[in-house]
Image (spheres, grey):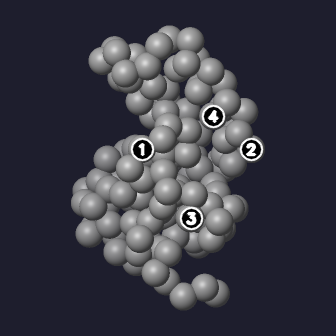
Amino acid sequence: MIVVDTNILIAVSILGSRSGKVHELLQRDSQWRIPQLWRYEFLNVLATYGRVGKMSPVLLSALWQKAYKENIALEEPLDMAYALNLALIHRITGYDAQFVCLAETLNVPLITEDRKLQATLPRIAFSIEQFLARPRV
């Protein structure tokens, strides 16, 4: 089991430079968990794609519906007070702290391409490449 951040979820839905590695990640560990925050971040990414004209509203709506249907079952509740504490201790955003909180609570790695987060919390936050290079347990 792993916690993945929203950028990992986006790479599953929208073909991009990370999509191949994300599919390797899925093959390695398909038990993904996410905080409810993913919904808002994912929606914001789609809205940004729409604003800059990268995708049509119809396609964006279809991507949202598909992602919601696939990811809703991956959601896990979390202790927001604990997330706030983590944000303050590690000087990270409240958004990032929710993913960290969930990973710590479940005692699993957080997979993120956020290099600052990886540097701040190297014992829990791993890039896709770092995670795939780890020995299987």
Residue designated by label 4:
67
Q: Residue 104, how many percent across, how many down?
A: 53, 67
Distance from the alpha carbon under mark 2 to that under mark 3:
21 Å
Using the rendered image of the protein, determine whether residue 38 is visible from the camera's viewpoint: no
Is the Cβ of the residue at disc 2 closer than 8 Å to that at disc 3?
Answer: no
Say which element carries label 4.
helix
Q: Residue 115, how many percent across, how many down?
A: 27, 61
Other residues around mark 3 within 10 Å, as few (<14) / some (14–19) / many (≥20):
some
Distance from the alpha carbon under mark 4 to that under mark 3:
19 Å
Is the Cβ of the residue at disc 1 closer than 8 Å to that at disc 4?
Answer: no
Using the image, determine if residue 66 lies above or below residue 53: below
Is the Cβ of the residue at disc 2 closer than 8 Å to that at disc 1?
Answer: no
Say which element carries label 3.
helix
Distance from the alpha carbon under mark 1 to that under mark 4:
16 Å
Q: Quadrant of the N terminus?
A: bottom right
Other residues around mark 1 within 10 Å, as few (<14) / some (14–19) / many (≥20):
few
Using the rendered image of the protein, determine whether residue 91 is visible from the camera's viewpoint: yes
Q: Amino acid at mark 2?
A: Ala
Other residues around mark 4 within 10 Å, as few (<14) / some (14–19) / many (≥20):
some
| Residue at (57% x, 71% y) in the render | 108
Q: Nearer the viewer, mark 1 or mark 4?
A: 1
Q: Is tag 4's residue or tag 2's residue first in the polypeptide sequence?
A: 4
Residue designated by label 1:
16
| Residue at (34% x, 75% y) in the render | 122
Which quarter of the figure has residue 137?
Answer: bottom right
Q: Amino acid at mark 3?
A: Glu
| Residue at (72% x, 33% y) in the render | 69
Q: Nearer the viewer, mark 2 or mark 3?
A: 3
Say which element carries label 1.
loop
Using the image, determine if residue 83 lies above or below residue 62: below
